Image (cartoon, rainbow, N blue to C red):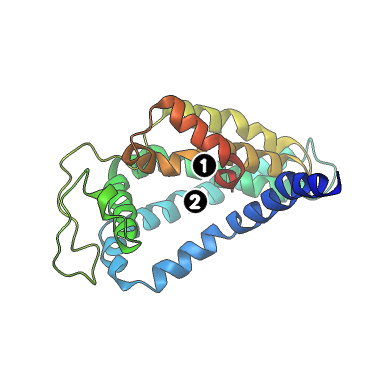
Amino acid sequence: MAPRMLENIQRVVLRPTWENTIASIYLLKGVVFFISHPYLYPLLKARLIPATLLSAFVLLNLFFWTYLPQVAFLALFHKTGSAWVNGTFLVLGEGAAAVAILFETFLVDESQVDVFDAVLIHKGYEDLVSQFRPVSDETLNDPVRRLGKPTKSSVYGPFNFRQIAEFIVLLPLNFVPYVGVPLFLLLTGYRAGPLQHWRYHNMRGFDKKQRNAFVKRTRYQYTW
């Protein structure tokens, strides 16, 4: 009885807690990986820098023109200073939606595919990448230069109006004092997280049922 109980605790509590803790530092791991692998730098220069500049332009304008009015509106629902925090996340959310519509999906997707494929090659998964584009055996120390032009449809993540609509619908959660921001972040991550592996699912040849089953097993890690 006791061993079975310990096994259940490990399966239900300890393992998910550990996996979610690791998932929560994925962003930091990504930054460290990027900095420590110079072969990715040209991709930053090609597309990601313009995307960053546009994002900064959009966010600066939103904060300059809309932040204080939105904080004033939120103050009607918030009795303390939490309106400032919620207003910040509200503007950041609006900015993310605007950037996605204006730029990200249309101009950055190709670079995201190249980054994704180059990292897969670096990790030794040429067989997955070669299904969608030729992979050269030259310049073995530079995965980006090994990438040929895609021979099949290569989409990092689908442009999804439903996702943007859900994002906008969830924005009013920021009106809720204290718990509104965490709920907004968790729900948007819950819905949008799996799309970051859309290309991987295609490489694996998953149909909708298989993709949903795979996502279900790692849903909370995707949320982060």
Q: Secondary structure at mark 2?
A: helix
Residue sitting nearer the eye, 214 or 176: 214
The residue sitting at 42% across, 52% down in the picture is 55
Side of 75 relative to 23 (left or right): right
Q: What is the count of numbered marks?
A: 2
The amino acid at mark 1 is: Gly
Residue sitting nearer the eye, 67 or 112: 112
> What x and y, as percent, mark residue 197?
42, 43
- Evaluate whether residue 66 shows in this view: no
Q: Are marks 1 and 2 in contact (CB under 8 Å)?
A: no
Side of 137 relative to 204 (left or right): left
Mark 1 vs mark 2: in front = 1
Q: CA distance from mark 1 to mark 2?
A: 22 Å
Q: Which mark is residue 193?
A: 1
The residue sitting at 73% across, 52% down in the picture is 14
Q: Which mark is residue 102?
A: none
> What x and y, as percent, mark residue 208?
42, 26
Residue sitting nearer the eye, 92 or 40: 40
Residue sitting nearer the eye, 74 or 140: 140
Which one is earlier in the sequence, the residue at label 1 or at label 2?
2
Side of 7 relative to 135 (left or right): right
> What x and y, as percent, mark residue 117?
30, 53
Q: Secondary structure at mark 1?
A: helix
On screen, 198 above or below 115? above
The residue sitting at 79% across, 35% down in the picture is 77
Residue position for label 2: 59
Quadrant where the N terminus sits is top right
Crowding at mark 2 (Cα within 10 Å: few <14, some 14-19, many 20+): many
- Evaluate whether residue 94 shows in this view: yes
> What x and y, as percent, mark residue 33?
43, 68
The residue sitting at 59% across, 38% down in the picture is 190
The amino acid at mark 2 is: Leu
